[in-house]
């Protein structure tokens, strides 16, 4: 384990030197994140901004094709005092340096024109051929978070990490690895432990428990009542969503079903189907399953236990969209050996909401466990 840490430090040292060379003497830096940035992307962007600042007078703009929807992520942005611009209003041609963090050119989850070769790409998803064209790229598939890579850079440059930045990087690692419950390597744990003393614990609690609008509960309730299951699979089709982050949130929640190893959530947003896949079955790679689900009709990928995808909709006809969704569900069940004949609702529908008294809501075998 020590050897792994030392090796990572050496690798990061070399990489960091080259990154600094690319950042040197730039005046304007555009950092592009996924369309709906998660904490790992936000922390990585904040760290890259610090690294760029250490190289001279540079104005940094953080941008994405969508917006930050999830309450936790908005709370993190507020705490960091970061402003995220829309990519539409920040044409890359206006900047002398363009960077992609936590995503790659043509990955499908960012709005950077695939024809544009960014100067910098730092990510932890499987490398894409296009990425190799960039002047600087550092893609480490085994890492649980891009935040870990940036923590190593900051260390190599001997830059002091502010409390908000330490908090953001720590939160980025926590959320991408689901508190080390999914893929994480020693480097992630090492970064987490190093960041912990200088992070703001109270703020982490506040960010994680950020307050949500009422619509959030409506969506979660609908997602759960509509969820279906067969054998080791559970899935829910959310329909149109205002906030795309809810799709991955529902997938995370469904994976907690003790009878399922695979959870899929599908939502519709701005002319796209958004897919989120979670797995606790390490024998099959979720990224590869996602590839299979979207096939040639969309893009997608990810890691062993977490993957995302998007399918552009060329129609607004609901019947056609329904057929597309049915096809995805069919492929999902077939790929994982779940039988269509075994499909059932995740939650039995209660016939009468008036019967939701304590006695009626708790079935006899459940009540045994209530103290
Ligand atoms: Mn990430």
Image (cartoon, helix red, strand yellow):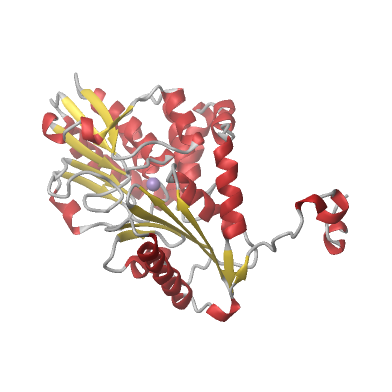
Residue 138 image offset from top left, x and y in percent: 25, 47
Which residue lies at the image location 50% right of the left edge and 27% below the top edge? Answer: 198
Residue 72 higher or lower than 285, as above or below: above
Q: Is residue 327 left or right of residue 221?
A: left
Viewer-side residue, 328 vs 54: 328
Viewer-side residue, 217 vs 202: 217
Q: Residue furthest top?
A: 57
Viewer-side residue, 200 vs 118: 118
Q: Is residue 143 left or right of residue 369?
A: left
Residue 57 higher or lower than 279, as above or below: above
Q: Is residue 55 left or right of residue 75?
A: left
Q: Please give the count of numbered marks on the rendered protein.
A: 0
Residue 160 image offset from top left, x and y in percent: 37, 24
Q: Is residue 354 left or right of residue 98?
A: right
Residue 285 higher or lower than 341, as above or below: above
Which residue lies at the image location 77% right of the left edge and 56% below the top edge? Answer: 352
Which residue lies at the image location 53% right of the left edge and 26% below the top edge? Answer: 200
Which residue lies at the image location 35% right of the left edge and 33% below the top edge? Answer: 155
User: Which of the 4 image quadrants contains residue 245?
Assistant: top left
Residue 38 image offset from top left, x and y in percent: 41, 41
User: Which of the 4 image quadrants contains residue 300?
Assistant: bottom left
- Is residue 184 something that shows in the picture? no
- Is residue 156 something that shows in the picture? yes
């Amino acid at each position: 384990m020590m050897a792994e840490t030392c090796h990572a430090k050496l690798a990061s040292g070399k990489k960091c030197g080259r990154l600094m060379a690319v950042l040197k003497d730039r005046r304007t830096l555009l950092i592009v994140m996924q369309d709906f940035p998660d904490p790992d992307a936000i922390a990585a962007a904040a760290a890259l901004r610090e690294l760029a600042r250490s190289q001279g007078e540079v104005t940094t703009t953080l941008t994405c094709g969508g917006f930050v929807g999830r309450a936790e992520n908005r709370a993190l942005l507020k705490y960091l005092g970061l402003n995220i611009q829309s990519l539409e209003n920040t044409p890359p041609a206006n900047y002398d340096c363009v960077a992609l963090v936590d995503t790659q050119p043509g990955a499908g989850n960012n709005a950077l024109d695939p024809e544009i070769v960014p100067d910098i790409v730092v990510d932890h998803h499987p490398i894409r051929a296009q990425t190799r064209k960039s002047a600087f790229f550092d893609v480490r598939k085994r890492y649980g978070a891009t935040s870990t890579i940036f923590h190593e850079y900051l260390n190599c440059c001997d830059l002091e990490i502010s409390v908000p930045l330490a908090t953001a990087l720590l939160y980025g690692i926590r959320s991408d690895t689901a508190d080390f419950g999914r893929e994480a390597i020693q480097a992630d744990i090492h970064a987490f432990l190093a960041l912990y003393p200088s992070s703001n614990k109270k703020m982490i609690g506040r960010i994680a428990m950020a307050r949500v609008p009422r619509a959030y509960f409506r969506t979660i309730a609908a997602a759960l009542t509509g969820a279906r299951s067969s054998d080791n699979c559970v899935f829910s089709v959310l329909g149109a969503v205002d906030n795309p982050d809810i799709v991955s949130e529902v997938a995370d929640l469904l994976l907690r079903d003790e009878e399922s190893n695979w959870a899929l959530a599908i939502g519709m947003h701005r002319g796209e189907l958004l897919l989120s896949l979670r797995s606790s079955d390490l024998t099959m790679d979720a990224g590869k399953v996602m590839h299979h689900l979207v096939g040639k009709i969309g893009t997608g990928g990810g890691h062993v236990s977490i993957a995302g995808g998007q399918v552009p909709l060329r129609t607004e006809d609901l019947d056609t969209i329904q057929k597309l969704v049915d096809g995805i569900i069919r492929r999902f069940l077939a790929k994982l050996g779940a039988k269509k004949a075994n499909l059932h609702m995740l939650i039995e529908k209660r016939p009468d909401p008036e019967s939701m008294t304590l006695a009626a809501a708790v079935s006899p075998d459940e009540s045994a466990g209530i103290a």
